[in-house]
Amino acid sequence: MDKIRVGVIGVGYLGKFHAEKYSRMEHVQLVGVADIHDRRVEEVAARFNTRAFFDYRELLGHVDAVSIVVPTEHHFSVASECMNHDLDVLIEKPMAATLDQADELIALAKSRGRVMQIGHLERFNPAVIALNEIVRKPMFIEAHRLGIFQGRSTDVSVVLDLMIHDIDIILNVVKSEIKCIQAVGTPVICEHADIANVRLEFASGCVANVTASRISIKNQRKMRLFQKDAYVSVDFSSRKITTIHRDGTAACADSLIPGMNIQQHSFSEADVLEDELVSYIQAVSTRQAPVVSGIAGRKALQVALGITDQINSAIKPYVN
């Protein structure tokens, strides 16, 4: 099997980890890394024994596939250039800055026969994978994603930075159209909203209440889902799921909640970024559809932009 030649475009905080994972893969050759910051790209290239490119366009003729880990405003132009050079692309979330850009990328990937995977990392969390097998028809969902301020991804709001993870997970389990969005949020430290809350109402009757903050004093990634006869609690950080479901058998007579069976599931620690990149390389190699397609990325983006628009409209009169 010939090695797949890959490159990483953008080697800031997250991009350097892409380079690290690729450098260790058996069937991958990390041909080079590209970044406009000379010192940064030279340091990363030296660390992983690869070549530094100061203009990503000079990398394109040497690789089969790339990870695009640049600021969101550049996703469209960089991804378009790469696919027009017949390269497969993994684009970090959010896939684009606008829906029009997302639509153009989806159309371009189809017309050029390119694999385009969107970097919704949480999809590869073992707890999320298990969640998809447990949850059938949720009717109420509550999610909290809180993070200590890191000073990264401040070019977008907390909705496009953090909340979009939960939006993607919720859309994937509910599988119903959104009928109503009610959002609030505010900037505290950055130009864009640092904390946000949204209520999503689905055609199925499901309601999701989602909160995201990047100015918390602790990190938290939890979700609770309620469906007929069952309650599911997920801690994404510790990779634990607690399920409480109705069970009328005698074995449940001593249960903490009468008539309910309580089970806890723990999942071994996983390198979700590595799993994501391995999945991407497999899609590139087999020409199969990626786990997180452009269509899925667009759906999450559409909801996130709808939330962002509501927040911006509400706070605009109060911003000088």
Image: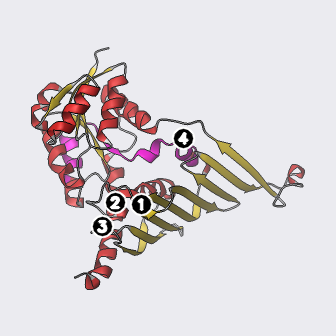
Where's residue 271, x and y in %? 47, 35
Residue 192 drawn in magenta: no
Mark 3 vs 1, N-terminal side: 1
Where's residue 211, x and y in %? 47, 66
| Residue for point 55% across, 57% down | 222
**Image position of 3 (left or right of 260):** left
> Dots 3 and 1: beta carbons under 8 Å?
no
Residue that numbered label 1 is attached to: 163
Part of the protein shown in magenta = 104-132
To which quarter of the image does residue 215 belong? bottom left
**Image position of 195 (left or right of 240):** left
* Mark 1 and mark 4: Cα distance apart in space: 19 Å
Residue that numbered label 4 is attached to: 126
Where's residue 118, x and y in %? 33, 45
Residue that numbered label 2 is attached to: 160
Q: Residues within 10 Å of mark 3 (few under 14, many from 20)?
A: some
Residue that numbered label 3 is attached to: 190
**Helix, strand, or loop for circle 2?**
helix
**Image position of 127 (left or right of 181):** right
Identify residue type, mark 3. Cys
Identify residue type, mark 2. Leu
| Residue for point 33% across, 43% down | 14
Mark 4 vs 2, N-terminal side: 4
